[in-house]
Amino acid sequence: MTNKIQAIFNRIAPVYDQLNDWLSLGQHRIWKEMTVKWSAAKPGDTCLDLCCGSGDLTLRLARRVGVTGQVYGVDFSPNLLETAKERSQKQYPQPVITWVEADVLDLPFNDDQFDAATMGYGLRNVTDIPRSLKELHRVLKPGAKAAILDFHRPSNSQLRALQQWYLDNLVVPVANHLGLKEEYAYISPSLDRFPNGKEQVGIARQVGFTSVTHYPIANDMMGVLAVTKA
């Protein structure tokens, strides 16, 4: 399953940012800024961005920590990491970002290493959500915060129907136009499997996070899970 998902993201890498803009009507930038804010990253911090994709959240973290800080962007797709490297060289050439090809279920970092962390649209695609959150808990310093942004199914049936209409009538046609229909067919099943906000809070507490809040955004079609390590 992991290799299959990795292959999907390698194939969509060239149009990943373009698709995000089209599919969110540009709103994903606002949601990502909110996520970085909830991570409480500050100048001089050492930060982690998991499932970094093309580096949107990573670059935002880098600007926040400044030249005295350090940011690690982690993804298992070498193609997306290459895209992220190219973007960072153009937008933020200061060497505060280290790009790491790794699995978020087995992070190559020491315990208690990071001051803050983010994850954008990645938790829904991992094969073991509790293990991923446990690894995140392990590498955060005591008192550190993390913010995890992702889509999920709304609890309201009308909003669920609206979300499905959006996927069927906007996401699939755009993906089809770009020759990526099969790659984006995974979205609906991944939403069906993904825990809702309340369930995410429960999992985060089970793996050791003490302060946990889920903030619904975009009419409950997505949310940010904000966690703190004791």
Image (cartoon, rainbow, N blue to C red):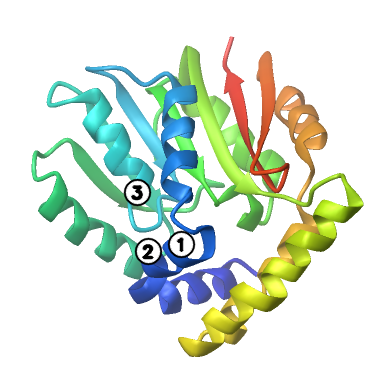
Residue visible at 38% across and 48% down in the picture: 74
Residue situated in front as seen by the camera: 6 or 87? 87
Residue type (three-letter) at the residue carrying disc 3: Asp
Callouts 2 and 1 close, C-beta under 8 Å? yes
User: What secondary structure is marked by label 2?
Assistant: helix
Q: Work out whether residue 34 can be spotted.
A: yes
Identify which amino acid the numbered label 2 is placed on: Asp
Q: Are marks 1 and 3 in contact (CB under 8 Å)?
A: yes
Q: How much space separates mark 2 and mark 1, taking CA atoms?
A: 5 Å
The image quarter in which residue 167 lies:
bottom right
Left or right of residue 71: residue 35: right
Residue at 33%, 51% (x, y): give it.
55
Q: Distance between the residues labelled 1 and 3?
A: 11 Å
**On the image, numbered disc 1 is attached to which residue?**
20
Residue ID at (57%, 16%): 229
- Quarter of the view holding residue 71: top left
Camera-nearest residue between 83 and 166: 166
Could you tell me how far apart the alpha carbons at marks 2 and 3 are, in whole angstroms?
Answer: 9 Å
- The disc at residue 56 is 3
Mark 1 vs mark 3: in front = 1
Residue 192 shown left or right of residue 212 in the figure: right
Q: Can residue 208 be seen in this view?
A: no
Using the image as rendered, state which of residue 22 and residue 44 is in the foreground. Answer: 22
The percent position of residue 77, horizontal first and vertical second, equals 41, 65
Name the residue carrying label 2.
17
Element assignment for label 1 = helix
Earlier residue among tags 2 and 3: 2
First in residue order: circle 1 vs circle 3: 1
What amino acid is at disc 1?
A: Asn
Q: Mark 3: which secondary structure?
A: helix
